[in-house]
Structures are given as structure tokens and as C-alpha cells.
Amino acid sequence: EDQVTQSPEALRLQEGESSSLNCSYTVSGLRGLFWYRQDPGKGPEFLFTLYSAGEEKEKERLKATLTKKESFLHITAPKPEDSATYLCAVQAVGTNAGKSTFGDGTTLTVKP
Amino acid sequence: DAGVIQSPRHEVTEMGQEVTLRCKPISGHDYLFWYRQTMMRGLELLIYFNNNVPIDDSGMPEDRFSAKMPNASFSTLKIQPSEPRDSAVYFCASSPLGGQPQHFGDGTRLSIL
């Protein structure tokens, strides 16, 4: 069974204090790993797709990286508007296309 | 461009009543997903459709839950009869070929009293 574990559950940062969120996964074969951002009262919003170990994607202050066992979401010099819950999901090779397993998320709070 | 549209945004009803949640996916997307999100269990996939056909309903908690997709523009999730433990936020998502990335609606917050 595919498993996704995100850590920490919650992270509080001061504005400008860089850090990383972790997503550890167990799948029989990785088809893709996806990062989403969820704001209170909203649905998750897609951020990145990573397909193979060594791949990196960047968007503004966020950078996602991937190894064979985990992914990191690096946040550089965060701002209060980066406060949100960040979800990681994996899609395995051979599963019904579209079926993804989500982690429980990391809730990030950035204080001004 | 319009995203995934869900209705109602909030629903409060009494135990035993029938509840119907509605979703309009993004035009041209082949996949439609129904999720349930709670603090205890996180985001759970209930069922998903490909080209209007249900592919995997293994996440549907019990027979009280049913979902339909009569055409490419509309889907419903029905709970009958509803119970307090069904209280959660229900999300609909759609995606193009391949099933990812998924585009989520803003959810229906369901409270069963």
C-alpha cells in the first residue's frame, strides 16, 4: 500500500527565516510526486510535479526536490502570505490512472 | 477561466436527511474526483471517474454514499441517510488526461446535526 508521511505537522517561522518541509513516501514505483498548497476555506492548489530523483522545480520562494525516498519543499525567505498547509501526494506506476495518495500536510505559519 | 465549481458551499442538516453535493468540473478534463477532508483522517479519496465512468469507488465509506456523473459537466455525491460522522469538508477535483495535476473546488462544508 502506498504511504505518504509529511513532517513536521506544523512549522512556525519568522518572516525571512528559511526552512524545509519533508515528504517521505513508499510506493512500488513512482509515477509522480505532487505538491499542493491549501489556504483555509479553500481547496488545494497545485504547485509542482516531480517525476524522477534529482529533479527540482522552483516557483518564487519555493523549491521542490526529489530523491528516491523523499521530497523536500524548501522555502527561502518566507513571507506571511506563504502561510498555508502544504500537501504532498504520490501517484504510483500501475495504479488506476489518477489515483493519488495524499499526506496529512504541514501547516506553515510565517510571522511578520 | 472558470475552475471547479461546487455547490452548496455550506450545508447544515439533521441526521437522517438526504444530502446532495454537486460539482461542475473544468471543461475538457477527463477525470473527476470526490474527496472528504477531516482533521482526523486528512484528505481521503472517495471515488473517481474517467470519461464519466466510475473507476474506483473503494473509498466510499458505505452504501449510504453514492456518486453519479451523468455527463462530462456534472457530478453528484449523495448521502442517504446522513449521520453526524459524515460531517466534513467534501471536495471535488478534476484533471486532464493522466489524472494529475488535480484542480480542486473550494469544497462543501457539511454539518450533520
Image: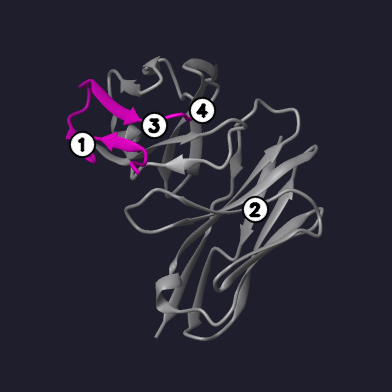
* Residue mark closest to the camera, 1 vs 3: 3
Name the amino acid type tagged 4. Answer: Tyr
Pointer 2 residue:
A5
Q: Chain of mark 2?
A: A
Spatial CA distance of label 1 from label 2 is: 31 Å
What residue do we see at 42% from left, 37% from top?
B36
Q: Do marks 4 and 2 share a subunit?
A: no
Of mark 1 and mark 3, the one earlier in the sequence is 1
The local crowd at label 3, few if under 14, some if 14 to 19, many if 20 or more residues have their Cα within 10 Å, is: many
Spatial CA distance of label 3 from label 4 is: 9 Å
Quadrant the C terminus of chain B occupies: top left
Regarding mark 1 in the picture, which secondary structure is present there? strand
Asked if labels 4 and 3 touch by Cβ distance under 8 angstroms, the answer is: no
State the image quarter where residue B87 is shown.
top left
Regarding mark 4 in the picture, which secondary structure is present there? strand
Quadrant the N terminus of chain B occupies: top left
State the image quarter where residue B16 is shown.
top left
Look at the picture and state if B53 lies above or below A104.
above
Pointer 1 residue:
B11
Tell me the magenta residue range. Answer: B1-30
Q: Which mark is residue B25?
A: 3
Q: Looking at the picture, how far across and down is residue A103, in whole percent?
A: 58, 49
Q: Chain of mark 1?
A: B
Q: Do marks 1 and 2 share a subunit?
A: no
Pointer 4 residue:
B31
**Residue B18 in magenta stretch:** yes
